[in-house]
Image: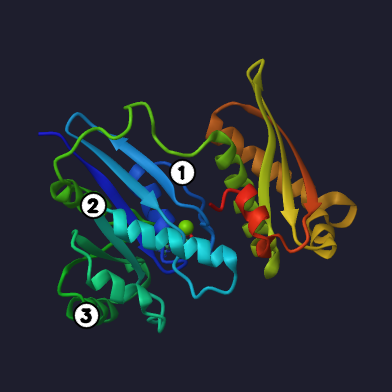
Amino acid sequence: MFKSGFVNIIGYPNAGKSTLINSFLNDKLSIITEKAQTTRHKILGIENTDDYQLIFTDNPGFTKPANIVHEYMNKKVKESIADGDIILYVVDLSSKSIDYDDLNDKLKKIKVPLIIVLNKIDKVDQQILEDVSKSWSKEFCNAEIWTVSALKNFNIENLKERIVKLLPKGPKYFPEEQWTDKSERFFVNEIIREKIFKNFKEEIPYSSEVVTEKFKYRNKIFRISSSIIVERNSQKAIIIGNKGLSLKNLASQSRIELEKFFNQKVFLEINVKVVKDWRKKVHQLKNFGYN
Ligand SMILES: Nc1nc2c(ncn2[C@@H]2O[C@H](COP(=O)(O)OP(=O)(O)OP(=O)(O)O)[C@@H](O)[C@H]2O)c(=O)[nH]1
Ligand SMILES: [Mg+2]
């Protein structure tokens, strides 16, 4: 009996959802940073065996919407709650509880198996762990509660075994060689975006988008040309930096990561462009893949 299904990973920003999907797949599919709202798009990561096809999805963090990008991100989370065969609700054990509990109300009504994944167990002591676990089991009588560390790989294999047990009978939704739904260009954009999140502070990461215009493979070299889109000239100046040094560092960190990702030599060129207030313009967002 072949099993398959969508295991949708959702939760608030920074809970460790992307770390968890990478840990399940033992691969770097999703970018991870210490800043909230890193993930903006839903990403599929597929694992195939002779007995099952597990389709994990990483999702943006559910957030109080302050702009259209947030609205798009929340829409993706809601879709993932509605179309999952199993829902993993990732919670950061070490952070204060969130007062914006729109998600909790939705999750209490779902009909499919719900697993609350209390993550970052490595950061808290036994007492906190017991108290938090108790309050979640009280709040959610329809869920299984698991405690894990996605970062340290603690309890991840056991959780995966449990997920496979819960998987419904089903077909192979995707051909065996397919491991994601995203293009190579998407991963280039994400890797550069990760470096922007790591190198710059405050509004810059949130005001930045990355577009890859050229992506060619010739003579065993990937030749890539990408643009960082920011909202204002002042942000462009910060990204470029004094004598272009900040951009040079960013490009070199991105290239190293891309070479690891593709396992090939990479030539990378990055430009910086201003599209005034792109986050407020619906047609711009569509061009950037926020559909
Ligand atoms: N100590 C510890 N840190 C963790 C664990 N899991 C994730 N983190 C850290 O938490 C931060 C956020 O991790 P992400 O995986 O990017 O979180 P996310 O839920 O995908 O965040 P968004 O995409 O912004 O919604 C990163 O600094 C991770 O290294 C864990 O089990 N233990
Ligand atoms: Mg993420």
Question: What kind of residue is marked 1?
Answer: Lys
The residue singled out by tag 3 in the image is 139
Q: Looking at the image, which residue is at 40% across and 84% down? A: 99
The residue singled out by tag 1 in the image is 28
In space, the residues marked 3 and 1 are separated at their CA atoms by: 33 Å
Q: Furthest residue to the front?
A: 283
Residue placed most toward the observer, 282 or 176: 282
Q: Looking at the image, which residue is at 41% across and 66% down? A: 15
Residue placed most toward the observer, 273 or 22: 273
The residue singled out by tag 2 in the image is 85
Q: Are marks 1 and 2 in contact (CB under 8 Å)?
A: no
Q: Label 1 CB, ligand 1: below 8 Å?
A: no
Residue 10 falls left or right of residue 65: left
Residue placed most toward the observer, 100 or 221: 100
Disc 1 secondary structure class: loop
In space, the residues marked 1 and 2 are separated at their CA atoms by: 24 Å
From the viewer's perspective, is residue 55 above or below residue 129? above
Of the image marks 1 and 2, the number of the one nearer the N terminus: 1
x, y (%) of residue 13? 46, 67
Could you say which quadrant of the image residue 47 lies in? top left
Question: What kind of residue is marked 3?
Answer: Glu
Could you say which quadrant of the image residue 9 lies in? bottom left
Q: Looking at the image, which residue is at 23% across and 52% down? A: 85
Q: Are marks 3 and 1 in contact (CB under 8 Å)?
A: no
Task: Please count the marks in the image.
Answer: 3
Disc 2 secondary structure class: loop
Residue 232 falls left or right of residue 99: right
Of the image marks 3 and 2, the number of the one nearer the N terminus: 2
Q: Residues within 10 Å of mark 3 (few under 14, many from 20)?
A: few
Question: What kind of residue is marked 2?
Answer: Asp
